[in-house]
Amino acid sequence: MSRPAAPPPRSPRSARRTVLGLFAAGALAAGALLPLHAAAADSAAAPAFNYGEALQKSLLFYEAQQSGKLPATNRVSWRGDSALDDGKDVGLDLTGGWYDAGDHVKFGLPMAASTTMLAWGGIAEKQGYTASGQMQYLKNNLRFVDDYLIKAHPAPNVLYGQVGGGSADHAWWGPAEVLPMARPAYKIDASCPGSDLAGETAAALASSSMVFADSDPTYAATLLTHAKQLYSFADTYRGKYSDCIKDAQGYYNSWSGYNDELVWGAIWLYKATGDSSYLAKAESYYANLSTEPQSTTKSYKWTIAWDDKSYGAYVLLAQLTGKQQYVDDANRWLDWWTVGVNGSQVKYSPGGEAVLDSWGSLRYAANTSFVALVYSDTLASDPVRKARYHDFAVRQIGYALGDNPRKSSYLIGFGANSPKNPHHRTAHGSWTDQLTSPVNSRHTLIGALVGGPSSADDSYTDDRSNYVNNEVATDYNAAFTGALARLYGEYGGSPLASFPPKESPDGPEMSVQASVNASGTNFTEIKAYLINKSAWPARALKNASLRYYFTLEPGVSPSQITLTTNYNQCGTVSGPTLYSGSTYYVTVDCSNTVIAPAGQSAYRKEVQFRIASAGAWDPTNDWSYQGISLVPGSTPVDAANIRLLDGGAPQWGAEPGGTGPSPSPSASASPSPSPSPSASASPSPSPSASSSPSSSPSSSPSQPVAGCAVTYTVGSSWGSGFTADVTVRNTGSSTVSGWTLAWTYRGNEVVTNAWNAKVVQSGAAVTVTDAGWNGTLAPGGSASFGFQATGTPAALPAFTLNGRACSTS
């Protein structure tokens, strides 16, 4: 199995500053920066984009990110309920909220920051949202996430800031509806506080209350109550949340600290309540905001994002008070993004993108653009800056929508040549826990803004494994959506009338494949796979059963039929049961196991069962015998006449003389053919040489050969490291109790951490032992583990299992 690497930490702000400073210095020396007037040289003409459609689609993305019980307002046909046990480990209901990005962790800080930015768009651009018909959809999405934030705040000084562990979540690649791992909940409280997280969540709920103030004043009041409590918590108990929720440090560490959120939260509470004490706090704490190195000048060489809200505070305080300090700080920041300040300017690509950082460059440009538009609308007394900031924003949003050298949109499902394969587990729809299979994503993640070019060179590749350029996230879309509402208000456009389109499955979601495993004059042995590749939505089969229909020959009674199993990953095999006339069926009960599109061993279960007769036997007239592969030992094929049920609900296959669920639904797109299961994908032992229940001669497959097989797959690689996934499989006939896998690298690889096994490396020699719970390998059984390593993956090494050489692939 191949899993994506757990992404490196979101770039620390301090490190980003250093890298960016060196990058800019080098560019200046090479004359690579644009002339300082270039960003505003041309006044933006009315662009040829349908901003109504873009806004409509950008909002829909949030419904694809919904966790928990989906509301009736969810419009994404391929999403289902998920993570319904969130919070049970702490005795709370913490279901709901948004999955962060292409993963399934609910990170509280970026979730709250995205909520604030979305709500700000609804407040500042109310006209655009209303005129485009998107205001109700905005409110639906805000209410969904606000309800979760309320749940996460069960007491005045308690806030749950994360659900799900980063490492375990990132080690698995599959759809949200069948998450297999435990999802711990993490909190801040008075004993271990997080002023940044509490302050941002206060801002989120306060700004949301302003959106609901007219349409639902009771709900708005509830939001404000929580916002006030959270801000008091943030202000009274000071601390960085990532010092308490340590799991977040590798993903959303609070690099900027909490001073910006204390200012930010106070501003939004002042705007929502009119209570001047909050404005006084915001102005008082403003002095604590960061400055440029060795300077008293407020920071301006970055931008507003999930970590640092200082830049939004400049603009809002400038608008609220008109004080020159705030105006100067806001102007300096946006000048640096446009015409430059003191010879320094954000890097521009030849095609016109303002590139602040490699990771999610379009997100930063969009965030700045939204605030620039909001600010420019209040600069009547400064017409030069008003036009400068406006035109900059129009240009940056246009770049994301397709006005770029590639003539390609970065908003999925909008415009020309938009991305098809974002780094997003549920949209990909893998059933094998593999980032690379199937090749093409099964769903269109409509409205998601991808990260975009990582350098100021306009280059981009639609590569699912590249989470720097091709991941999506709730914070990528938040300010971008507000900017689209603003541009719709200015330039117009027409939201699509029939939206969103409903997808159709790309093939059978549930199926049975079968072949003749062995046969004789008085018996037939069937090898059958029960398969779950569901993705519309993904769902688990928890009460599956299979029915194989056959015909009793004249003069043969049911008591003369004997059923045996040779290999069975399910439960009991029972029957025969009368269907009609002389037609009977065998039932394979799989209610003892879950069949889910969650991995190579999870999506498919195998059973080998033999039907033998003490009397006459002729399988050629059996209903379920038709269409299966008849060559003993051959690869199973789709068996349209074998019935698959979940409880009493048919999932696949036709009953005798009738029809069943269509085995081949029409595809809405053109997904690449996905590999059908084969023996190499999940081999099972060859059937044993059991004798026929009667004296009639029978043919018997050969005995299994003892041994082991190892699949070693490099999942993701970068310049200095890679991740790999290893599956060890017992191909012998005896159970392995406790295993040690060993190999010697041929290059410079060094394992740094692992999951699902214990790894020790000495020099080039690697020794892996089981984790205890996965130490028993039955014949045909397998265990999988993964690891991260430094170095460059070299040629495939040779493996031994408990000292015995293994075959490799």
Image (cartoon, grey):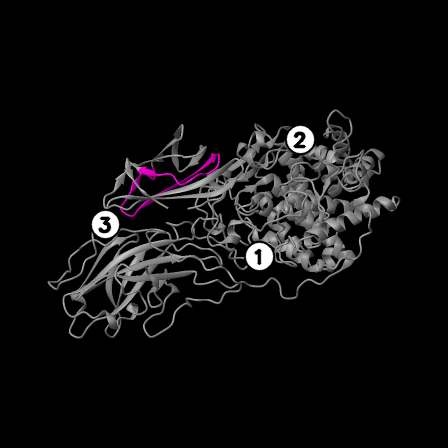
Q: Evaluate whether residue 214 shows in this view.
A: no
Spatial separation of the CA atoms under disc 2 and disc 1: 43 Å
Residue 328 visible in the snapshot: yes
Q: Distance between the residues labelled 1 and 3?
A: 51 Å
> Which label lies toward us, 2 or 1?
2
Q: Which of marks 1 and 3 is in front?
A: 3
In the rendered view, does 145 fall on the left or right side of 645? right
Element at label 2: helix
Q: Which span is picked out in magenta?
A: 773-800
Q: What residue type is labelled 3?
A: Pro
Q: Is residue 697 left or right of residue 685?
A: left
The image shows residue 782, relative to residue 565, as above or below, that is above
* Mark 3, residue position: 704
Q: Distance between the residues labelled 2 and 3?
A: 61 Å
Q: In this view, does 565 lie above or below 258?
A: below
The type of residue carrying mark 2 is Thr
The one of 232 and 593 positioned closer to us in this rendering: 593
Q: Which residue is drawn at 42% across and 51% down?
A: 432
Q: Mark 2 points at which residue?
A: 18
Q: What element carries label 1?
A: loop
Instruction: Find residue 178 and report its horizontal and vertical position in percent.
Output: 45, 50
Mark 2, Cα crowd under 10 Å, few <14 / some 14-19 / many 20+, is: few
* Residue 128 colored in magenta in the image: no
